[in-house]
Image (spheres, rainbow, N blue to C red):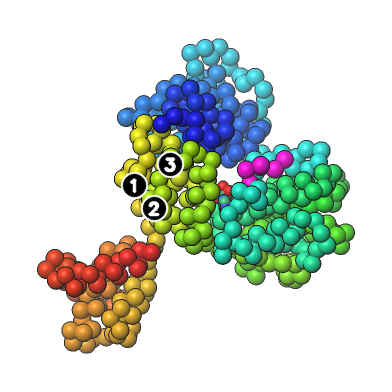
């Protein structure tokens, strides 16, 4: 298996001839560049070199051009760098940042900005507005039931015809494609209107710039820049909820842009009504537009997204059974799904292995445990009662007749297996029973599963349903 296809998937900048650890480092660098912002990255992180990587010991050593820089990076970025390594290679435990052998200087060449000025988005403004991430296009966005409303609205807005709605408010949980759609809107609109000013910014950046402008007593140019936008997109506005002066400014800008027929796209991780501290007049303004939600992707959409991502790789690199496995098991967000796929591929390259189901399970063991769906006791009781066709009140009742006692024991057993609840807590949820009753139930079902095939089949079925 060559490195080249990994390069295509993880990071277009990878070189097929690089050593595997170098390949991982290259990909980690681009993720750091994104998470820290261009200026911070160029000033502080770009000069770091991969000095050693001992996967067996779980240690990575990075060298900085000077002792000063090594200390500074260690103090400010150790955690982020460590996390980026672990996201790629989970067995990396320590990342050591040291001064390189040739470190004569004691100050960095360029005065790098302080990390407080970190920009959240990997984008920088240019004369024509924001540089958008070309990976996030409509073409690369896979449409399914969960996101078709948002997708269609985004397309309509981007096509630039007469608008029936404005603003467009996109909301949905994290990692479901909001930012992707915004960048896609920007690119599509720009393709159709090359002269248009397109401004995309995170709400954090909006706030940061606004506050900086206030301090510099120059809110005028900030406002002008925003008001010059043909399309203004503000991502993750939940961050400015409750911040009065920023909100106020945001509202004015929004009003003006809408009145002037400019297109406005706003995203948040929740619906407008659920944004705390957003004033009612902003809410009512938002509701003049279109509020489109993005729901968690169903299995079909998750699978289609993987298939789409695999199109860029040589056929057969990731077998279909692995794609199905990922789609089935990683359901929390598309970001996690992508991360899992990337990890499997990076892992295979680094260890020179062929990707099959066993390998994927091994590579993702930790992540799969972490993302196991949390099941509540209530859900367990409901499912068990449905299965055995008894009333849910029987879970807490004192009746000992076999037809209710057995299901109750099975539910206790499942609660022990599938939740983090303690035995006394479980007992309490079953009509205030003692923890010894729960222990007894767990042991009884364990024993029955071995000798009674019918009970075992019931338990398996319930486990499957509850684990999702
Ligand atoms: P959000 O802004 O909602 O937190 P993002 O837009 O950053 O989520 O999406 C997370 C990742 O998942 C991105 O890499 C994005 O390209 C990908 N993604 C999300 N939805 C889709 C989709 N429908 N098709 C293809 N990729 C998607
Ligand atoms: Mg986002």
Viewed as shown, does residue 161 lie left or right of 415? right
Above or below: residue 94 compared with residue 133: above
Q: Residue at x 22, y 75 (%)?
A: 409
Labels 1 & 2 near each other (Cβ < 8 A): yes
Residue picked out by circle 1: 357
Q: Nearer the viewer, mark 1 or mark 3?
A: 3
Crowding around mark 2 (Cα neighbors within 10 Å: few <14, some 14 to 19, many 20+) is: some
Look at the numbered disc 3 and give the secondary structure of its residue.
loop
Q: Nearer the viewer, residue 51 or 186?
A: 186
Q: Which residues are magenta?
A: 131-136
Above or below: residue 33 compared with residue 378: above
**First along the sequence among labels 1 and 2:** 2
Q: Is residue 61 visible?
A: no
Q: Position of residue 159 (x, y in %)?
A: 77, 55
Q: Residue at x 65, y 59 (%)?
A: 151
Q: Position of residue 180 (x, y in %)?
A: 63, 50
Q: Position of residue 158 (x, y in %)?
A: 75, 55
132 part of magenta stretch = yes
Taking the view exactly as shown, the residue that stands out farthest to the front is 315
Residue picked out by circle 2: 325
Q: Nearer the viewer, residue 45 or 30?
A: 30
The dominant secondary structure in magenta is loop
Using the numbered discs, state the Cα–Cα distance from disc 1 to disc 2 in whole angstroms: 8 Å
Q: Is residue 410 visible?
A: yes
**First along the sequence among labels 2 and 3:** 3
Q: Position of residue 365 (x, y in %)?
A: 34, 47
Which numbered disc covers residue 316? 3
Q: Quadrant of residue 289?
A: bottom right
């Amino acid at each position: 298996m060559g490195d080249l296809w990994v390069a295509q998937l993880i990071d277009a900048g990878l070189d097929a001839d690089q050593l595997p650890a170098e390949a991982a480092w290259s990909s980690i660098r681009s993720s750091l560049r994104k998470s820290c912002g261009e200026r911070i990255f160029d000033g502080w992180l770009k000069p770091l070199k991969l000095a050693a990587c001992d996967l067996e010991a779980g240690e990575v050593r990075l060298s900085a051009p000077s002792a000063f820089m090594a200390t500074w990076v260690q103090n400010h970025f150790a955690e982020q760098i460590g996390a980026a390594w672990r996201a790629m290679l989970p067995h990396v435990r320590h990342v050591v940042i040291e001064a390189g052998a040739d470190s004569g200087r004691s100050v960095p060449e360029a005065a790098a900005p302080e990390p407080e000025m970190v920009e959240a988005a990997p984008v920088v403004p240019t004369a024509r507005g924001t540089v958008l991430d070309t990976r996030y296009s409509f073409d690369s966005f896979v449409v399914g039931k969960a996101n078709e409303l948002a997708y269609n609205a985004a397309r309509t807005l981007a096509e630039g015809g007469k608008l029936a709605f404005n603003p467009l408010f996109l909301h949905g949980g994290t990692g479901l494609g909001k930012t992707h759609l915004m960048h896609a809107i920007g690119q599509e609109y720009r393709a159709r209107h090359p002269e248009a000013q397109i401004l995309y910014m995170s709400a954090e950046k909006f706030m940061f710039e606004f506050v900086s402008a206030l301090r510099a007593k120059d809110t005028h140019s900030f406002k002008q820049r925003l008001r010059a936008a043909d399309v203004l997109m503000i991502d993750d506005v939940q961050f400015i909820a409750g911040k009065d002066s920023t909100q106020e400014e945001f509202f004015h800008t929004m009003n003006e842009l809408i009145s002037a027929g400019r297109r406005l796209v706003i995203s948040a991780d929740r619906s407008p009504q659920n944004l705390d501290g957003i004033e009612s007049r902003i809410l009512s303004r938002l509701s003049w537009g279109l509020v489109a939600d993005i729901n968690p992707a169903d299995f079909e959409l998750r699978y289609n997204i993987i298939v789409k991502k695999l199109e860029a790789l040589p056929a057969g690199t990731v077998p279909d059974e692995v794609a199905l496995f990922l789609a089935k098991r990683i359901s929390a967000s598309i970001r996690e799904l992508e991360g899992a796929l990337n990890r499997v591929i990076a892992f295979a390259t680094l260890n020179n292995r062929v990707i099959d189901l066993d390998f994927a399970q091994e590579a993702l063991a930790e992540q799969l445990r972490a993302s196991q769906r949390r099941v509540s006791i209530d859900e367990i009781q409901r499912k068990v009662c449905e299965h055995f066709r008894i009333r849910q009140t029987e879970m807490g009742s004192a009746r000992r007749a076999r037809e209710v006692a057995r299901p109750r024991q099975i539910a206790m057993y499942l609660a022990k297996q599938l939740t983090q609840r303690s035995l006394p807590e479980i007992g309490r949820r079953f009509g205030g029973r003692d923890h010894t009753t729960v222990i007894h139930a767990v042991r009884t079902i364990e024993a029955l599963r071995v000798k009674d095939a019918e009970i075992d089949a019931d338990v398996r079925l319930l486990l499957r349903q509850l684990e999702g």
